[in-house]
Image: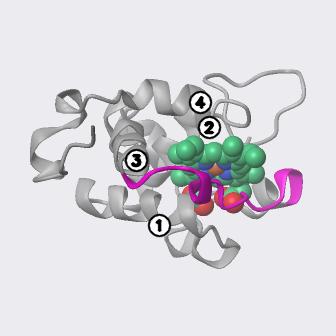
Amino acid sequence: MKKTILGLLLVGSSLFALSGEKVYDQHCASCHKMEMSKGEMLAPPMPKVSQRLRQAIESKEKFVIFVKDYIQNPKRDKGYCGARAYQNFGTMPPIGESMTQEEIEVVSLWLFEKFEIKSTQQNKKQKCGAGKCGAAK
Ligand code: HEC
């Protein structure tokens, strides 16, 4: 049973039958961890990804649109990750190809809503040229 997705940006992810967290566990967690880890990482941790995108993209709507697109068609030249992220991890594979539209919507919204933005003080420190973020630290 699929629900029609209406007014997604207004209602928020809690109304969906699918939970963003579950979609994350299933499709993202193998690469994007919830914390920085000392061990091997395959991608930048999720809080970092979310935080960085919030700094670079001012509105929730644009944030969600960006993530939806990036999941389906990731490209280095449209991303906001620092050069070092691409060096360390390579570009993300188009994992959205094996997901439903609903899963993609829900997880994109979840990525925005799940993480609190850090204080402005810290945002300032991390900001760097041309709207792109700095390399992952
Ligand atoms: C096979 C590993 C892998 C999986 C699975 C994966 N990612 Fe990624 N992702 C990466 C890597 C590597 C990067 C860093 C390089 C890049 O941006 O392409 C990344 C970067 C990102 C970015 C940052 C783009 C930018 O440039 O700012 C977003 C957003 C993102 N992933 C979302 C997701 C979501 C949501 C999922 C689950 C639906 C997911 N990823 C699953 C490997 C993965």
Residue type at mark 1 is Asp
Q: Which residue is mark 1?
A: 69
Is the CB–ligand 1 distance for label 3 below 8 Å? Answer: yes
Q: Secondary structure at mark 1?
A: helix
Looking at the image, do the residues carrying marks 2 and 1 touch, with CB atoms under 8 Å apart? no
Task: Please provide percent x and percent y for residue 43.
Answer: 74, 43
The reply to whether the C-beta atoms of the residues labelled 4 and 1 are less than 8 Å apart is no
Amino acid, disc 2 = Cys
Residue found at x 57% / y 71%: 129
Asked if ligand 1 lies within 8 A of label 4, the reply is no
Does the numbered disc 2 mark a residue whose Cβ is under 8 Å from ligand 1? Answer: yes
Please report the bounds of the magenta region as a residue range: 87-101
Q: Which comes sooner in the sequence, label 4 or label 1? A: 4
How dense is the environment of label 2, judged by Cα within 10 Å: few (below 14), some, or many (20 and up)? some
Q: Mark 3 or mark 2, which has the lower sequence index?
A: 2
**Image x and y of residue 53, in percent:** 46, 53
What colour-coding does the image apply?
A: one colour
Q: Nearer the viewer, mark 4 or mark 2?
A: 4
Numbered-mark total? 4
* Residue 51 pos. (x, y %): 47, 42
Out of 88 and 136, give the one closest to the viewer.
88
Q: Which residue is mark 2?
A: 28
Task: Report which residue position mark 3 lands on.
Answer: 108
- The first of marks 2 and 1 along the sequence is 2
